Image (cartoon, rainbow, N blue to C red):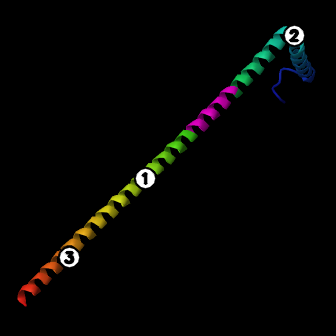
């Protein structure tokens, strides 16, 4: 035999009482047209709007930071290209100067050889 102290009728009565208590609790809740409910709904809507505004603000800030970063990268790339151009220009000038110096030395050797040949005749 089970060790239940309550019989089926008592358990069924307790179940019905619990269901009725739950129903009464639900019925006691304020209706949708109650000012307190209206105020709470308005607060929830305001909080949701504020949350959406904060999210939009963060997105805008991230986008602005991304654009600033891209602009900085572009500026750095332009500076690098300009520095490379300047370096090539300087190298070109040095190469021209070296060629001019080599030509001058070659011309001097040629002139000296011609002078020696004139003296030797």
Residue located 30% across and 66% down the image? 96
Give the Cα distance between marks 2 and 1. 72 Å
Quadrant of the snapshot with the N terminus: top right
Residue located 87% across and 11% down the image? 28
CA neighbours of label 1 inside 10 A, class few (<14), some (14 to 19), many (20+): few
For the stretch drawn in magenta, the main secondary structure is helix
**Where's residue 26, x and y in %?**
87, 16
Residue that lies at the very extreme toward the left in this rendered image: 120
Say whether residue 118 is magenta. no
**Where's residue 103, x and y in %?**
24, 73
Residue located 91% across and 22% down the image? 12
- Residue 107 disc label: 3
Relative placement, left or right, of 12 versus 79 is: right
Magenta highlight range: 53-65
Which mark is in front, 1 or 3?
Answer: 3
Q: Picture quarter containing residue 90? A: bottom left
28 or 32, nearer to the observer: 32
39 relative to 51, above or below: above
Give the structural element (helix, strand or loop) at label 3: helix
CA neighbours of label 2 inside 10 A, class few (<14), some (14 to 19), many (20+): few
Q: Which residue is mark 2?
A: 34
């Amino acid at each position: 035999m089970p060790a239940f102290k309550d019989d089926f009728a008592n358990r069924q009565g307790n179940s019905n009482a619990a269901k009725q208590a739950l129903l009464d609790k639900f019925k006691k809740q304020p209706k949708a047209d109650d000012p307190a409910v209206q105020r709470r709904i308005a607060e929830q809507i305001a909080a949701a709007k504020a949350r959406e505004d904060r999210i939009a603000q963060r997105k805008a800030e991230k986008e602005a930071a991304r654009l600033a970063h891209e602009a900085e990268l572009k500026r750095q790339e332009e500076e690098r290209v300009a520095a490379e151009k300047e370096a090539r220009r300087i190298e070109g000038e040095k190469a021209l100067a070296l060629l001019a110096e080599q030509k001058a030395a070659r011309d001097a050797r040629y002139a000296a050889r011609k002078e020696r040949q004139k003296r030797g005749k």
